[in-house]
Image (cartoon, rainbow, N blue to C red):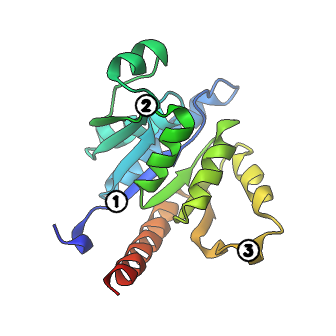
């Protein structure tokens, strides 16, 4: 397949536990985000877990796009019985065997762009891993504090990183469109360097 014709893979991170007062609204937004990514003909990659990523997978899968989950487990048995994680709405599961931290690294490296939605404590680690991988990052603003927390982590460090690759937006469609554009530019730049 020609590199220019490959689909963009967008990974989505978010809290595994969405049990708070606005949880139903959060899950609806996650499902809608998955649908939006599918409508843009992208592959969805997620941590193969519960909560926000699971509902993104549900929206994407029902809209007909390919969903690939990255599991912390070494096998399907460990995934289901030890970690107690779902397998629904994923067309393919990659069993990393490296725990959550290791599977986060593999997921980030396997994606062309990364989106963060409503997050939990683990989201700060996931964001740092994605940031280190130098991929285009989209942060979905919403009725949660995740975007504010991630923004505060970046404040004061604008001179040490390319802030143009990090997009904050409350419109999923606009966010995905901007990320696809940046992902294509990033892939083209990497391909140009590899050809030298």
Q: Is residue 29 visible?
A: no
Vertical comparison of 128 with 74: above or below: below
Q: Residue at x 76, y 53 (%)?
A: 148
Q: Secondary structure at mark 1?
A: loop
Q: Which of the two discs, 1 and 2, sits closer to the camera?
A: 2
Question: Which circle marks residue 160 in the picture?
Answer: 3
Question: Which circle marks residue 40 in the picture?
Answer: 1
Q: Badge 2 is on which residue?
A: 97
- For the residues bearing labels 1 and 3, Cβ distance under 8 angstroms: no
From the top left corner, tell me how far across and down residue 115 is, in percent: 53, 53
Q: Secondary structure at mark 3?
A: helix
- For the residues bearing labels 1 and 2, Cβ distance under 8 angstroms: no
Q: Which of the two discs, 3 and 2, sits closer to the camera?
A: 2
Vertical comparison of 149 with 71: above or below: below
Q: Residue at x 43, y 69 (%)?
A: 183
Among numbered discs 3 and 2, the one appearing first in the sequence: 2
Question: Which circle marks residue 175 in the picture?
Answer: none
Judge by depth and name the residue closer to the eye, 165 or 178: 165
Rounded to the nearest angstrom, the CA distance separating label 1 from label 2 is 31 Å
């Amino acid at each position: 397949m020609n590199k220019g014709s490959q689909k963009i893979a967008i990974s989505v991170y978010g809290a595994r536990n969405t049990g708070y007062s606005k949880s139903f609204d959060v899950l609806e937004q996650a499902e809608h985000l998955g649908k939006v990514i599918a409508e843009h003909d992208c592959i969805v990659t997620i941590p193969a877990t519960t909560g926000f990523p699971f509902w993104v997978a549900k929206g994407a899968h029902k809209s007909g796009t390919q969903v690939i989950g990255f599991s912390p487990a070494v096998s399907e048995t460990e995934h289901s019985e030890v970690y107690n994680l779902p397998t629904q709405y994923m067309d393919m599961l990659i069993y990393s065997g490296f725990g959550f931290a290791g599977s986060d690294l593999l997921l980030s490296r396997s994606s062309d762009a990364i989106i963060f939605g409503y997050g939990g404590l683990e989201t700060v680690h996931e964001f740092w891993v994605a940031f280190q991988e130098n991929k285009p990052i989209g942060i979905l603003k919403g009725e949660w504090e995740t975007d504010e927390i991630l923004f505060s982590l970046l404040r004061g460090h604008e001179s040490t990183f390319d802030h143009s690759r990090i997009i904050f937006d409350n419109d999923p469609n606009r966010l995905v469109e901007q990320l696809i554009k940046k992902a294509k530019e990033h892939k083209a730049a990497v391909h140009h360097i590899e050809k030298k």
